[in-house]
Image (cartoon, grey):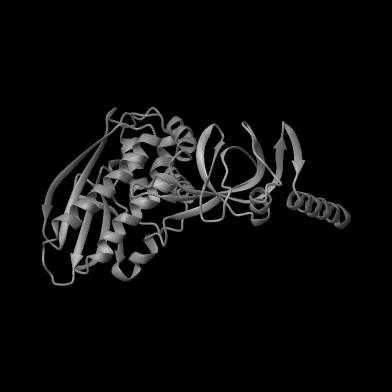
Amino acid sequence: MSTQFSILSANSIELHYRFNDNSHTMNAAVFNKCECEFLGIAKELAVKLNVEMEIEVEPLANGGLRSWFSFNSKDKSTIKTAFFVFLLTNVLFTPIMTTIDVITRKVIDSFFEDPEISELKKEKEKAELKYDIAKFESETKPLCRTIDENIIKKKKSNYYESLSKYEKVEDVSIAIEDDKKNIIKESKIHRENFEQYILSSNELDPEIEENAIIEIVSPVLKKGKYKWVGIYNGKVIQFSMKSNEFKTLVQTGKIQFKNGSSIICNLIITKQLDNDGVVKIKGYNVTSVDVHFENSTPIETPEGRLRRQKKEAEKKQLSFDL
C-alpha cells in the first residue's frame, strides 16, 4: 500500500479478477452478476449516507480481468467522494460476520484520523478544502447507523457466492485509486477465503413476542396440519398453533370462539432474506396461549397459569439472590 498519495484524491475503484488459467476472459453472466451486486452495495450506501454519487464504469483491461468504477459526488465534494470510496471498499472486503456498524465505525475512525485529514481540520480555510470536514464528520456518524445490514450482507454474499461457484477465479482484489493513476490502498481475497464472505443461511433470528394479541378469524377445529387465521397488529395472518394443550381444549369444545374472540400468546415470527436482502416473513407460530377471551372477559389457560407462576418464582429468586 502506498502512502505518498493524497487520501482526498481517492475517486475510483479497481476490481481485479485473476484466473487460474492465466486467461483474460470471464463468463459474462458471472461478471455481470458480480458487478450488479457491487453496484447494489454502492447504491445502498449512497442512499443511506444521503450522498448523490455519479458512478461511471471505465474500459476493461487484461492482467486477469480488471474493471474500474469512477465516483464523484454531485456537489463535487472531494471529501464525500473519498469517504464513500473507502467505506465501499471496506464493506465489500470485510468478512460477512462483521457487522456494518463495526465496519463503519472503523472506517470513520481511520478516515477522519488520517494525518492528512487531521491537518486539514486545522486549516479549514485552505483553498483546496471545499467542504467543512468537521460538519461532514458529524453528519456521517448518525447516517451510517441507517445502513441496512441485511441488504449489504446479502449483496456481498451474492457477490462472493458467484465467484465461489466460478472455479476459474483464483482471487479478487480491490484497489482505491486516483484517476486510475496511483494506488492509494489495495486488498486481495483468495478463493480459499471466499466462504468467509458468504452467508451460511438466509434464515434470520426469529422475533419472539411474549404477549402477542391475536384476534381469531378462523380456528382449526379438527386434527391436522392446518393453519389458523387471525389478525395481528392490524394484519391478517396465517399461523400454526403449536400448543397441543390449547388445541385439545378447542377441539373438545371446552373453548369456543365467537366473533371478535382473541388470545394472548407467545408468538414466534420466523424470517428470512430474499435475494435482494429484503426481510420476508416466513411464518408465524403460536407456541403457547396464556389467555383467551370469553365475551371480553380474560380467562387464563392452565399453561398460561403455569408460565405466569414460573416467571413469578424466577423473579422472586432473582430478588432473593440480590
In this picture, is 97 found above or below 305? below
Q: Is residue 265 left or right of residue 189?
A: right
Percent of width and height locating residue 136: 42, 32
Query: Quarter holding the N terminus?
Result: bottom left
Query: Quarter holding the C terminus?
Result: bottom right
Q: Quadrant of residue 27?
A: bottom left
Percent of width and height locating residue 115: 41, 46
In this view of the protein, which residue sits in the foreground, 316 or 121?
Answer: 316
Q: How many marks?
A: 0
Whether residue 128 can be seen here: yes
In this view of the protein, which residue sits in the foreground, 209 or 72?
Answer: 209
Q: Is residue 47 left or right of residue 103?
A: left
In this view of the protein, which residue sits in the foreground, 20 or 130?
Answer: 20
Measuring 78% from the left and 52% from the top, which residue is drawn there? 311
Percent of width and height locating residue 113: 45, 45
In this view of the protein, which residue sits in the foreground, 76 or 34?
Answer: 34
In this picture, is 159 found above or below 130? below
Q: Is residue 173 left or right of residue 121?
A: left
Percent of width and height locating residue 189: 31, 64
Q: Quadrant of residue 255?
A: top right
* Residue lying farthest to the right in this orientation: 320
In this picture, is 30 found above or below 56? below
Measuring 20% from the left and 57% from the top, which residue is drawn there? 30
Q: Is residue 92 left or right of residue 272?
A: left
Whether residue 1 can be seen here: no
